[in-house]
Image (cartoon, coloured by chain):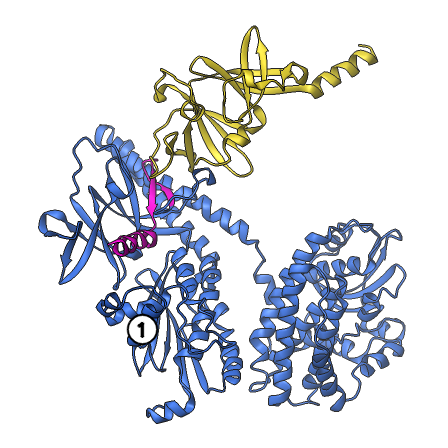
């Protein structure tokens, strides 16, 4: 392998971004893998009083309490999948620890920054500013969602 | 930084150490006047010495100077030249106060603290007036070119002179802050044994008046290899050499000089020898970061939950299985694990315990100072200071207690004249007690002052617009007295420096409540006031009553639960639109948890509302209507992710033996909610 090739490969690695791609209704979204700490099956939650509908309640994740939000409700996406059949993406950020219920998790998506469309996002549906980019994979549009913005506050 | 030391880390270490030493000073200094034992003087001395050394190392020279002057006075006391009278005692106490204030300053700003010049002058006057310059002794020693007599004397008393070594350390010439290095070496040595002396003497080391070579005389408790390795591990050290110390030789040859400050360590050795105590009691204990204990506590919490779960599973298996041999063995093992876990939990809780004296010990001083300021005569008596409580509780009650004692002094106790007129002894008394009772800690503050006048509080409430005159008149005396916990409710006729700004008692109550405690008053006008605090043993684990509504389980802190009743046996009435029940002649409002928490789903049946859990305190109760009672249980309090925002009516969550999450009811906010309803009607 020549030096140039090696260098090129290095550059590619630097720009490679990994996302967890998931399904909500008939749309696809992705979170950066950096903010995802795990994916678990649906589990029983204890509902909390006087919170928004999308916050389903507190579940037990290995002895810690985990608030679970129905991402379909939060993002305003219709879905026929029962919550018991969904999956929970667990995210731990600096300020928050939360589980996000989605229909299905598809794969870990690897793209380069160049492939992400960062402007003209208004062609995506209005998603309250959570979407920070769009990737086109085999003619499927995937909205990249900033998990930090999403989990700032539930209310 | 050139020396490669992270100053911020170092500052933390410094503050931690200084805090420990200051607390020794605070405890001992007040007793110096009345009981100047040599043990006491010795421990004050060592504490001051340590603070001085480390603050110099940190570059807090003004702060160190204050300690230095303080030490100078103590020399004279130690040597019997000076007797601590009331005035000198006062100055020394003031100095310790200033050191405490200074430490806060160092902690918050990271900058040096400049003490009041008057204080320095006062200390100088004491030491110069009655003993001449103190440096002379060590100065003589410094020129004497042999180990001073004190050192050899002390050495000859050492049980194990074989352990004494001369240690030569050469610092790396590129080393930036030389004294910090030396300080770290000395710290390390004190962990391995004891530094007896150094050359150059400590003050020169502190001033960095040396090249790169320092010689120490140390008494080692570890092996030379271990010591060499430890010191090399400090970094930026070029060479380390240990040589066995020979008493005879040293007398003739060695140009070593005693550590000028003063040979406190030597004194310590001699004292210990004299008292026939084990030489280093400190080696029996180690310093542990609180966060480590917290982490252990959490892990044990998990174990406790799994233990409960395990016994449930075990019981389930036993019920279904026919393999009695294995189910018996399982039951036995589960039982054993339960016992061990229980023991483990208890031991770790004990590791976090401190005697409540940690907080109490400051009050005699505070009362003395305040009573002087207020011109009142007050004696304070402390009982049960040895009662052990969890660290978290200690931290939580410190401020509330200060507030309450200040209040008792300022508002509670009358002026001497008034007391005499009412046939009371001239001096007021405050009794502070602590005890374990009913799996809780009870702290009481009792004064023999004027008590809380309900009439005055009623008038105040009307004046402040808190309630109408009619509403105020309807309050029982006790309810009126409870008004002092209302915010903005200072009844002092004028604002004083000590208290009376109208902040205080409401904060006291909310602090106590936020740690799951309860505060109560028992006051008779003219006779005195008793404040009663009932505190949890620890804030991490809590006894709770489990009650179900729909599919959800709620935990009520057991300390707030007064009684439980079945709805079948009681009469529900209505006041206005609100349901109430009559409990032994008292009207208690009823609140359906189902409605309060908007519980939607039911438990396979229509809302049962079969039981009432009466929560609150003697003066304010509310009956919470629930479907099921599930018994008492110890629960580990889990925080709820910030993602959920503020959850009104809940103070946290816990995980039950069956793995489900139960919600912990915040009784205080429920009571507040009830009060809100009252005001609305």
**Residue A102 image point, x, y percent:** 43, 21
Q: Residues within 10 Å of mark 1 (few under 14, many from 20)?
A: some
The image position of residue B254, as x and y in percent, is: 88, 71
Q: Is residue B411 magenta?
A: no
Query: Which residue is nearer to you in this view: B340 or B37?
Result: B37
Query: Which quadrant of the rendered structure holds the C terminus of chain B?
Result: bottom left
Left or right: residue B641 versus residue B81 is left
Where is mark 1, residue-wise? B459
Q: Secondary structure at mark 1?
A: helix
Q: Is residue B616 above or below residue B310?
A: below
Could you tell whether A30 is left or right of B654 in the image? right
Can residue B302 be seen? yes
Residue found at x 23% / y 36%: B550
Q: Is residue B665 magenta?
A: yes
| Nearer-the-camera pick, A131 or B21 | A131
The single residue placed furthest to the top in the displayed view is A138
Q: Position of residue A79 (x, y in %)?
A: 38, 17
Question: Could you say which is closer to the camera, residue B486 or residue B387?
Answer: B486
**Letter of the chain in yellow:** A
Q: Total of numbered circles in the picture?
A: 1
> Which chain is painted in blue?
B
- Chain under label 1? B
In this rendering, is residue B274 above or below B323? below
Spot occupied by residue A14 in the image (x, y as percentages of width and height): 71, 21
Image-quadrant location for residue B68:
bottom right
Is residue B329 something one can see in this rendering?
no
Say if B620 sits above or below B140 in the image: above
Residue visible at 43% across and 62% down in the picture: B507
Q: State whether residue B153 is above or below residue B326.
A: below
Using the rendered view, name the quadrant where residue A61 is placed. Answer: top left
Residue at (69, 68) in percent of width and height: B50
| Chain part drawn in magenta | B652-681
């Amino acid at each position: 392998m020549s030096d140039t090739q090696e260098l090129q490969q290095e550059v590619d690695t630097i720009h490679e971004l990994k996302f967890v791609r998931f399904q909500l209704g008939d749309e696809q979204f992705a979170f950066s893998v950096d903010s995802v700490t795990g994916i678990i099956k649906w589990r029983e939650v204890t509902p909390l009083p006087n919170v928004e509908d999308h916050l389903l309640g507190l579940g037990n994740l290995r002895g810690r309490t985990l608030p679970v939000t129905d991402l379909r409700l939060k993002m305003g996406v219709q879905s026929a999948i029962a919550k018991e059949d969904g999956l929970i993406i667990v995210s731990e950020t600096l300020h928050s620890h939360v589980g996000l219920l989605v229909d299905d998790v598809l794969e870990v998506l690897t793209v380069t920054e160049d492939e992400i469309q960062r402007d003209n996002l208004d062609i995506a549906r209005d998603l309250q500013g959570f979407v920070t980019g769009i990737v086109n994979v085999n003619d499927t549009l995937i909205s990249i969602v900033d998990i930090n913005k999403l989990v700032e506050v539930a209310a | 930084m050139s020396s490669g030391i992270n100053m911020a880390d170092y500052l933390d270490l410094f503050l931690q150490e200084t805090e420990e030493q200051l607390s020794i000073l605070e405890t001992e200094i007040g007793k110096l006047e009345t009981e100047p034992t040599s043990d006491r003087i010795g421990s004050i001395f060592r504490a001051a010495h340590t603070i001085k050394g480390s603050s110099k190392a940190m570059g807090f020279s003004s702060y160190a100077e204050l300690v230095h002057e303080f030490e100078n006075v103590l020399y004279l006391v130690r040597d019997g030249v000076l007797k601590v009278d009331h005035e000198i005692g006062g100055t020394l106490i003031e100095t310790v106060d200033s050191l405490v204030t200074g430490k806060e300053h160092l902690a918050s700003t990271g900058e040096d603290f400049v003490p009041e010049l008057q204080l320095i002058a006062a200390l100088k006057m004491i030491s110069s007036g009655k003993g001449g310059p103190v440096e002379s002794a060590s100065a003589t020693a410094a020129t004497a070119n042999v180990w001073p007599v004190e050192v050899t004397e002390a050495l000859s008393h050492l049980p194990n002179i074989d352990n004494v070594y001369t240690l030569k350390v050469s610092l790396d010439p590129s080393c930036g802050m030389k004294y910090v290095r030396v300080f770290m070496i000395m710290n390390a040595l004190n962990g391995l044994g004891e530094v007896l002396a150094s050359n150059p003497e400590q003050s020169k080391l502190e001033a960095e008046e040396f090249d790169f070579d320092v010689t120490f005389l140390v008494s080692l408790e570890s092996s030379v290899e271990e010591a060499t390795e430890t010191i090399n591990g400090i970094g930026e050290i070029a060479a380390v050499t240990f040589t066995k110390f020979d008493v005879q030789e040293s007398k003739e040859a060695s140009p070593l000089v005693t550590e000028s400050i003063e040979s406190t360590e030597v004194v310590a050795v001699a004292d210990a020898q004299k008292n026939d105590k084990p030489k280093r009691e400190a080696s029996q204990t180690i310093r542990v970061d609180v966060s480590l204990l917290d982490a252990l506590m959490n892990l044990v919490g998990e174990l406790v939950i799994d233990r409960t779960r395990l016994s449930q599973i075990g019981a389930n298996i036993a019920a279904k299985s026919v393999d009695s041999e294995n189910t018996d063995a399982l039951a036995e093992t589960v039982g054993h694990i339960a016992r061990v876990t229980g023991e483990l939990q208890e031991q770790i809780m004990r590791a976090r315990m401190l005697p409540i004296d940690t907080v109490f010990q400051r009050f005699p001083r505070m009362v003395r100072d305040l009573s002087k300021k207020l011109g009142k005569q007050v004696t304070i008596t402390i009982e049960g200071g040895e009662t052990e409580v969890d660290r978290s509780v200690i931290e939580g009650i410190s401020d509330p207690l200060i507030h309450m004692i200040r209040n008792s002094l300022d508002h509670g106790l009358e002026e001497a004249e008034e007391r005499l007129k009412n046939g009371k002894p001239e001096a007021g008394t405050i009794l502070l007690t602590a005890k374990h009772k009913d799996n809780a800690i009870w702290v009481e503050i009792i004064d023999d002052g004027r008590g809380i006048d309900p009439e005055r509080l009623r008038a105040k409430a009307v004046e402040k617009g808190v309630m109408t005159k009619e509403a105020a008149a309807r309050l029982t005396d006790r309810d009126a007295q409870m008004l002092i916990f209302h915010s903005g409710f200072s009844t002092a006729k004028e604002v004083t420096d000590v208290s009376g700004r109208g902040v205080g008692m409401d904060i006291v109550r909310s602090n106590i409540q936020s740690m799951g405690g309860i505060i109560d008053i028992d006051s008779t006008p003219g006779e005195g006031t008793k404040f009663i605090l009932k505190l949890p043993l620890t804030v991490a684990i809590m006894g709770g009553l489990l009650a179900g509504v729909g599919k959800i389980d709620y935990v009520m802190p057991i300390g707030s639960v007064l009684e439980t009743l079945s709805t079948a046996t009681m009469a529900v009435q209505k006041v206005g639109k609100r349901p109430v029940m009559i409990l032994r002649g008292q009207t208690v409002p009823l609140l359906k948890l189902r409605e309060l928490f908007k519980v939607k789903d039911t438990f396979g049946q229509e809302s049962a509302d079969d039981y009432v859990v009466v929560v609150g305190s003697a003066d304010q109760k509310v009956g919470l209507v629930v479907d099921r009672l599930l018994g008492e249980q110890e629960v580990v309090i889990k925080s709820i992710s910030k993602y959920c925002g503020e959850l009104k009516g809940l103070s946290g969550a816990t995980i039950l033996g069956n793995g489900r999450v139960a919600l912990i009811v915040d009784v205080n906010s429920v009571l507040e909610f009830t009060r809100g309803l009252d005001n609305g009607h």
